[in-house]
Image (cartoon, helix red, strand yellow):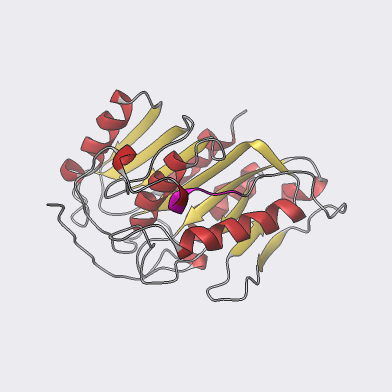
Amino acid sequence: MPTRRALLAGGAGPAVAVLLAGCTVRSPGRSGDGRGAEPARLSARPGAPAVATAPAPGTRALDLGAEPDPLLHVPPAGAAGRPLPLVVSLHGAGGSPQAGLELLRGPADELGVVVLAPGSRGPTWDAVGGTYGPDVARLDRALRQVFTELPVDPGRIGIAGFSDGASYALGLGLANGRLFSRVMAFSPGYVPPAPRSGTPEVFLTHGEDDTVLPVDRTSRRIVPALRDEGYDVTYREFAGPHTLPPELARAAVEWFARP
């Protein structure tokens, strides 16, 4: 049976290279043996935005009628009106949309990437230790609103996350590979099961000294399993604990933003 270990802590703040939120550990396996496609499937797709004016740079909340409000961050370089790369950034257990945003905001600003940071309705994401449901529906609504307002590049839409957010990013990213071309997972615990679609590329990091989600039980099993299934996986293991070093956050965004 899978082993569940939920350690709640504060979400990421401006200093990303600190110990971040808690996680759930499970035995990694194929996500293709899940409980049906629909609960994990996102229907939102980019198109011509309804708003013709260039998007204003900065951060604002999207009012979806239920807290926590997702945060949308447009980089300074995003005001030109050209098609923009977009990454969904997911916080760890006990975190917040602000924590998800801070994971990647610095390098995203430098490289001209829009960041959408939603929040889980519960202490962690619905499929982490449970089933896909309301968090997927809320992300779908947020994406529809973003696609209505911004000229998003359909070939450069990604999903990222730390800790429980990394596990959720893998689950949703592999289930929605025709929407997300690239998936970034920072110290994941496992891959929540769901039938997969598409073949997104994967960028994964993990600390050798992680005592929250030990690398031997998590990424060192996840990476070869994904490669065996034909996924293109870039893996960066580093000397450090349960964290995302700033240089790897930048490397991930550079990897994502490349043509």
Per the image, is 146 magenta? no
x, y percent for residue 102: 51, 60
x, y percent for residue 197: 46, 35
The relative height of residue 227 versus residue 243 in the rendered view (above or below) is above
Per the image, is 40 magenta? yes
Residue farthest toward the right in the current orientation of the protein = 52
Q: Is residue 161 left or right of residue 222?
A: right
Q: Is residue 79 left or right of residue 258?
A: right
Instruction: Looking at the picture, tell me which residue is in the foreground, 149 or 59.
Output: 149
The relative height of residue 188 versus residue 59 in the rendered view (above or below) is above
Image point 62% across, 76% down: which residue?
Answer: 65
**Magenta-tinted stretch:** 39-43
x, y percent for residue 115: 60, 53
Residue farthest toward the left in the current orientation of the protein = 1
The image quadrant that residue 141 belongs to is: bottom right
Q: How many marks?
A: 0
Image point 79% across, 44% down: which residue?
Answer: 48
x, y percent for residue 212: 21, 57
Instruction: Looking at the picture, tell me which residue is in the foreground, 160 or 32.
Output: 32
Image point 50% across, 54% down: which residue?
Answer: 89
The relative height of residue 174 versus residue 16 in the rendered view (above or below) is above
Instruction: Looking at the picture, tell me which residue is in the foreground, 5 or 162.
Output: 5
Image quarter where the C terminus lies is: top right
